[in-house]
Image (cartoon, rainbow, N blue to C red):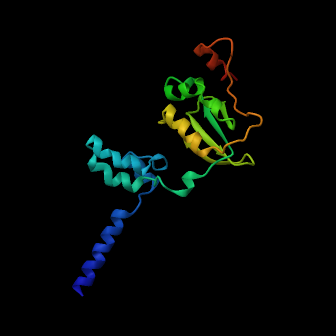
């Protein structure tokens, strides 16, 4: 009888260890559950942060989930040009030639908005919205290569609002005027 009780207690404690935390619990611990991938938790050892690894694992999203491999018909990258100084990696992506690789990508300037990507289905309905504040230019490009449906030619819907005559930063600010 004592062995059965001991086994039950052990099973309950193991279940607690493997249990996922809520988004609010993760936020209190300093993690954003929706953005935390489990592969990031594995890298904590490299920085001497082994102590927070168990909590990280309870808040993370598995990298190999089938939903993460879905492709979307169109994407809209929304950002405010007034935030370019805070997010130079997003500015670098937008001002480089990289967006032209994705004909089904639209860049939209929205006043006061931190950079987000809205992923749309074929009917134009938003399926997912992701914050990309911590992404670098290579991550943004890789994400679009992986998650945007490949278009076989046709008219490009890629667009960026900018003044072609002048490349100064003020031109980008002009796009946000109301």
Q: Count how many numbered circles sit on residues in the image.
A: 0
Image position of 7 (left or right of 134)? left
Residue 117 is at least partly visible in this image: yes
Q: Is residue 96 above or below residue 134?
A: above
Residue drawn 47% across and 36% down?
134
Residue drawn 54% across and 29% down?
90
Q: Position of residue 156 (x, y in %)?
A: 73, 33
Q: Is residue 57 above or below residue 92?
A: below
On the rendered image, what quadrant is the N terminus found in? bottom left
Q: Position of residue 13 (x, y in %)?
A: 30, 69
Image position of 24 (left or right of 164)? left
Image position of 97 (left or right of 88)? right
Query: Which residue sits furthest left?
Result: 2
Residue 110 is at least partly visible in this image: no
Residue 173 image-quadrant placement: top right
Q: Position of residue 89 (x, y in %)?
A: 50, 28
On the rendered image, what quadrant is the C terminus found in? top right
Residue 11 image-quadrant placement: bottom left
Relative to the observer, which residue lies in front, 64 or 53?
A: 64
Query: Which residue sits furthest bottom?
Result: 1
Residue drawn 28% across and 46% down?
45
Relative to the observer, which residue lies in front, 70 or 12?
A: 70
Residue 102 image-quadrant placement: top right
Q: Position of residue 164 (x, y in %)?
A: 69, 15
Q: Is residue 178 above or below residue 18?
A: above
Q: Is residue 92 above or below residue 128?
A: above
Relative to the observer, which residue lies in front, 29 or 131?
A: 131
Residue drawn 26% across and 49% down?
51
Relative to the observer, which residue lies in front, 77 or 82?
A: 77
Image position of 49 (left or right of 18)? left
Query: Which residue sits furthest right?
Result: 155
């Amino acid at each position: 009888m004592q062995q059965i009780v001991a086994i039950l207690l052990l099973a309950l404690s193991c279940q607690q260890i493997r249990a996922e935390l809520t988004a609010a619990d993760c936020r209190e611990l300093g993690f954003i559950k929706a953005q935390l991938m489990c592969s990031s938790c594995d890298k904590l050892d490299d920085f001497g942060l082994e102590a927070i690894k168990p909590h990280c694992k309870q808040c993370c999203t598995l990298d190999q989930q089938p939903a993460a491999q879905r492709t979307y018909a169109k994407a809209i990258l929304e950002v405010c040009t007034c935030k370019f100084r805070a997010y130079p990696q997003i500015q670098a992506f937008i001002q480089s030639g990289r967006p032209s690789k994705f004909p089904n990508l639209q860049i939209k300037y929205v006043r006061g908005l931190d950079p987000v990507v809205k992923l749309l289905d074929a009917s134009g309905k938003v399926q997912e919205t992701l914050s990309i504040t911590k992404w670098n230019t290579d991550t943004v490009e890789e994400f679009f290569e992986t998650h945007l449906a490949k278009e076989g030619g046709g008219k490009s819907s890629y667009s960026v609002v900018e003044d072609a005559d002048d490349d100064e930063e003020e031109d980008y600010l002009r796009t946000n005027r109301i």
